[in-house]
């Protein structure tokens, strides 16, 4: 089965399928026009195809054919991919938290600088008042 037929059978738009697979619509279009499908995406496509007696061809002329063992294998590959994506997400969240902490520290430093500037301005105004009162 080709990917276009699978997509149409499942009533999916290119965008919906692209979102499910984590690729662009341009990639889906390329696959539908005969470009090889990476082996890493075959398992996900097989799950979308409900793992029936569907054969989906990947790169290097490899394919996944329906059957319970292949469904388990495809599911395991999908679980591994999700786990890898989760690790990447966790790393990104840690980096965001670190950046937020740095931003909070910078804001605290700016507040302290504002306070010092305000105090300096008040002292300068007091000195100017003294100079004005002595110059009269």
Image (spheres, rainbow, N blue to C red):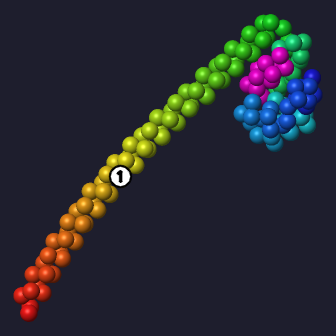
Residue 129 position, x and y percent, is 13, 81
Q: Looking at the magenta stretch, what is its main secondary structure? A: helix
Q: Residue furthest top?
A: 68
Tag count:
1
Q: Along the horizontal axis of the image, is 53 left or right of 85?
A: right
Residue 118, by quadrant, is bottom left
Judging from the image, what secondary structure is the residue with disc 1 in?
helix
Q: Nearer the viewer, residue 115 or 102?
A: 115
72 relative to 94, above or below:
above
Asked if the stretch drawn in magenta spans residue 48, the answer is: yes
120 relative to 10, above or below:
below
Q: Is residue 14 visible?
A: yes
Q: Along the horizontal axis of the image, is 117 left or right of 128?
A: right
Residue 38 position, x and y percent, is 78, 28
Q: Residue furthest bottom?
A: 136
Residue 7 position, x and y percent, is 88, 29
Residue 104 position, x and y percent, is 37, 47
Q: Quadrant of the C terminus?
A: bottom left
Q: Is residue 3 visible?
A: no
Residue at the image point whose x is 52% and y is 30% from the top: 90
50 relative to 34, above or below:
above
Residue at the image point whose x is 6% and y is 88% from the top: 134
Q: Quadrant of the N terminus?
A: top right
Residue at the image point whose x is 78% and y is 7% from the top: 69
Residue at the image point whose x is 29% and y is 62% from the top: 114
Label 1, on which residue?
106
Q: Residues within 10 Å of mark 1 (few under 14, many from 20)?
A: few
Q: Along the horizontal axis of the image, is 18 left or right of 110?
A: right
Q: Which residues are magenta?
A: 38-50
Asked if the stretch drawn in magenta spans residue 68, the answer is: no
């Amino acid at each position: 089965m080709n990917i276009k037929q699978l997509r149409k059978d499942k009533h999916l738009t290119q965008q919906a399928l692209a979102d499910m697979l984590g690729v662009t619509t341009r990639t889906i279009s390329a696959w539908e026009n005969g470009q090889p499908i990476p082996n890493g995406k075959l398992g996900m496509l097989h799950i979308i195809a409900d793992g029936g007696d569907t054969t989906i061809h990947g790169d290097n002329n490899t394919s996944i054919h329906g059957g319970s063992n292949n469904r388990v294998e495809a599911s395991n590959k999908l679980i591994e991919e999700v786990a890898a994506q989760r690790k990447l997400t966790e790393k990104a969240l840690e980096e965001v938290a670190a950046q937020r902490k740095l931003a909070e520290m910078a804001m605290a430093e700016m507040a302290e600088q504002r306070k010092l500037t305000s105090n300096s301005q008040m002292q300068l105004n007091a000195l100017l008042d003294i100079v004005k009162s002595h110059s009269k």
